[in-house]
Image (cartoon, rainbow, N blue to C red):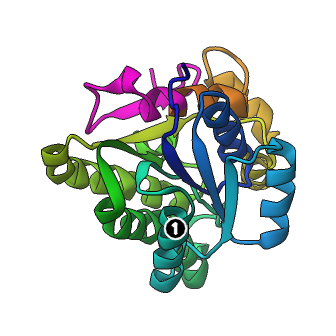
């Protein structure tokens, strides 16, 4: 028996490193998984890596209402009502002082992280089974400030916590758990682009700078974050809701 046997799981940002690692962990535990991402080519690559008939894909922009409705409908049509809704899609923005931060890029980051998670909850909840789980990927910077110039990203990650706390209260009536997952720096391309911006702004190697701030003195791996997502997706977290779950190597301590 797997932890997610016959559970229907929807993962946005499913072609990225954390989304793909989580999908792999979910499938190994018996889940049926819908991967959602912006580009069809990325989804094709991700699905080919998983090599499972329990995986389907849907290209969508998570910040657009019609696209969200479409990926929710596609999931239900393919697999049935949703048990796990993993709102994991994200974008980086830029790393620059707030006085130089471009207005349009700020709006783009808020749209993907905050509006994207809001729309996932709004349209996903009516299509979820009671007793399910909603997971929103936030970040270590969603529970602490950051002076590195990623102002839009930090703002969005804090806003997701407020969204989670609000939604968790109402969803509890249906025994649906809602939590945010807060990775620290991860060894992936997404994080590397952020660290390149930190390097430029700080005049020091951004990766080394962050490793110094992490008590475990290293970046996390996508599969390690996937294990935290699996905990939140499964009945192991049956009494956990409205919580900020940290997987940050002790960076927040």
x, y percentage for residue 35?
Answer: 65, 57
User: Does residue 28 show up magenta in the picture?
Assistant: no
Kind of element beneath mark 1? helix
Can I make out residue 247 in this image? Answer: no
**Which range is magenta?**
230-253
Q: Say which residue appears at 46% left-offset and 77% top-offset.
A: 69
Quarter holding residue 30: top right
Which residue is the site of mark 1?
77
**Left or right, residue 49 beside residue 77:** right
User: Does residue 236 show up magenta in the picture?
Assistant: yes
x, y percentage for residue 129?
Answer: 32, 50
Toward the top, the furthest residue is: 216
**Left or right, residue 216 beside residue 72:** right
Q: Nearer the viewer, residue 19 or 212?
A: 19
**Left or right, residue 65 beside residue 204:** left
The C terminus sits in image quarter = top left
Can I make out residue 9 in this image? Answer: yes
x, y percentage for residue 175?
Answer: 21, 40
Quarter holding residue 106: bottom right
Count of labels in the image: 1
Q: Say which residue appears at 61% left-offset and 75% top-offset.
A: 100
Crowding at mark 1 (Cα within 10 Å: few <14, some 14-19, many 20+) = few
Q: Nearer the viewer, residue 190 or 75?
A: 75
Q: Say which residue appears at 45% left-offset and 53% top-offset.
A: 157
The N terminus sits in image quarter = top right
Q: Nearer the viewer, residue 248 or 163?
A: 163
x, y percentage for residue 37?
Answer: 67, 65
Q: Say which residue appears at 87% left-offset and 51% top-offset.
A: 48
**Left or right, residue 80 beside residue 105:** left
């Amino acid at each position: 028996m797997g932890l997610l046997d016959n559970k229907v799981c929807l993962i946005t940002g499913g072609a990225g490193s954390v989304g793909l690692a989580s999908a792999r962990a979910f499938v190994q535990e018996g889940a049926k998984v819908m991967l959602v991402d912006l580009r069809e080519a990325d989804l094709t690559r991700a699905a080919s890596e998983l090599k499972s008939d329990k995986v389907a894909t849907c290209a969508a922009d998570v910040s657009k209402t019609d696209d969200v409705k479409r990926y929710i409908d596609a999931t239900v049509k393919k697999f049935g009502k949703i048990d796990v809704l993993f709102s994991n899609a994200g974008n980086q923005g830029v790393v620059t002082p707030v006085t130089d931060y471009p207005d349009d890029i700020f709006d783009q980051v808020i749209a993907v992280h905050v509006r994207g998670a809001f729309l996932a909850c709004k349209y996903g909840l009516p299509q979820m089974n009671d007793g399910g789980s909603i997971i929103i990927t936030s970040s270590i910077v969603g529970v602490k400030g950051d002076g590195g110039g990623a102002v839009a990203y930090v703002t969005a990650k804090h806003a997701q916590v407020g969204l989670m706390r609000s939604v968790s209260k109402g969803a509890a009536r249906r025994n649906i758990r809602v939590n945010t997952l807060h990775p620290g720096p991860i060894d992936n391309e997404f994080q590397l682009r952020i660290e390149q911006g930190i390097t430029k702004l700080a005049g020091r190697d951004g990766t080394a700078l962050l490793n110094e701030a992490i008590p475990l003195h290293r970046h996390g791996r996508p599969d390690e974050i996937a294990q935290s997502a699996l905990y939140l997706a499964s009945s192991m977290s049956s009494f956990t809701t409205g919580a900020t779950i940290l997987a940050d190597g002790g960076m927040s301590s």
